[in-house]
Image: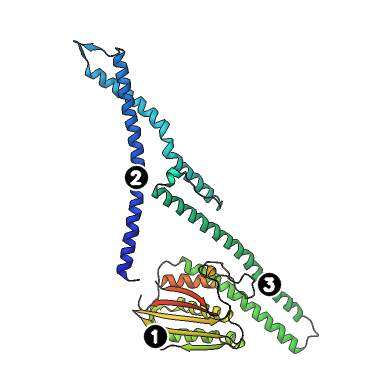
Amino acid sequence: MKKEERRLLRASKKGKDRKSRKSLTLFFSVFVFIILLAAVMLTALAIWALGKAGFFIRLDGELKISTIMLFAFLISIVLGTVATFLFVRIPLKPINKIINKMNRLAAGDFKTRLEFGSTLSSIPAMNELTTSFNTMAQELENTELLRNGFINDFSHEFKTPIVSIMGFASLLERENLTEEQRQQYVRAIREESLRLSSMSTNILNLNKVERQTILTDVTHFNLSEQIRSAVLLLEDKWTKKNIDLRLDFDEFMVEANDELLKQVWINLIDNAIKFTDDGGIVELEMSEKSGNISVKISNTGEEIPKEKQDKLFNKFYQGDEARSVSGNGIGLAIVKRIIDLHHAKITVSSENGVNTFTVILPIKQ
């Protein structure tokens, strides 16, 4: 989207926001005006009734103005206070309702939702408030469900390699093992240890990038070389599955955080290898356009349903519900956060048996 289009979109949204805020201001202004008008009319009615009853003192045949003003002042104070006490609860009722719902939300009741009557709901600002609150509650509920699921899954995944390591270590204590068996158990312990290390590293990386608000340590480096290095780091994985790895790109230079960006390519390439069947294809393409570098990482395999594509970058989300492929729902969350720090964009598409992750990265920060 061009800068001018983005500016117009922001201006349009700002205009709509102002309009909805004005409607809320108008609603409360009209309500206060009605209270004041009611107080004035009741005061006038009371003065008229008292005058009819001959209650006011007359001086030289004329009604003393100061007396009327004194009575009008006293009556308006009394009636205004009573009217305010009686009617102020009407506009305060939705505010009390909002406070109660927010307290429930703060207490951990993420199923709570905010609803108003048809009259209040017809006010754009109140409708916007309801939508925003309910969206926030829904997101918190989803995050809580994902977090709980992650804790259960992660605890299970963390426990599994530990149990395996303990089991193989116990087997190694046997004296009647052949050298082949001994090497097999040592290899299994090493693999499970690497698995634990990978999970711990992902947790630490996620915690680190979530705390980071600005991009630091920006350097100018060869992006193509960085991606080739990431591919070499994962060589054991793609050679073990006999994957046809295709690299199609020239040399591209970029300004970015070298360490953080390398995590993006390792996670995306590892993800592509993980979800590619034996003998499948993983392809990496790069191109430059309008000051941006486009990096496409594609793999053949089972397509990602559209309803899952938007959730892939959520923390703790695992698209493979059957758990046929190992993972902990952290890698793509790290990728998304690093991409955001670089003011870049990542999209996913899945069609014709090919899944493609596309990163649009600015050449200069």
Residue 218 placed where, x, y %?
A: 39, 76
Q: Earlier in the sequence, mark 3 or mark 1?
A: 3
Does residue 281 appear to the left or right of 57 in the view shown?
right
Q: Secondary structure at mark 2?
A: helix
Q: Residues within 10 Å of mark 2 (few under 14, many from 20)?
A: few
Q: Amino acid at mark 2?
A: Thr
Front in this rendered view, residue 44 or 260: 44
Q: CA distance from mark 3 to mark 1?
A: 42 Å
Does residue 185 appear to the left or right of 30 in the view shown?
right
Q: CA distance from mark 2 to mark 3?
A: 59 Å
Residue 287 placed where, x, y %?
A: 40, 84
Q: Amino acid at mark 3?
A: Thr
Residue lying at the far right in this picture: please name it. 176
Residue picked out by circle 2: 25
Whether residue 7 is situated above or below residue 130 in the rendered picture: below
Residue picked out by circle 3: 160
Q: Secondary structure at mark 3?
A: helix
Q: Secondary structure at mark 1?
A: loop
Report the mark closest to the observer, 2 or 3: 2
Q: Earlier in the sequence, mark 2 or mark 1?
A: 2
What numbered label is drawn on residue 252? Answer: 1
Quick one: quadrant of the C terminus? bottom left
Count all numbered tags in the image, as a single digit.
3
Report the mark closest to the observer, 3 or 1: 1
Q: Amino acid at mark 1?
A: Phe
Q: Residue at x 43, y 39 (%)?
A: 92
Residue 254 placed where, x, y %?
A: 38, 81
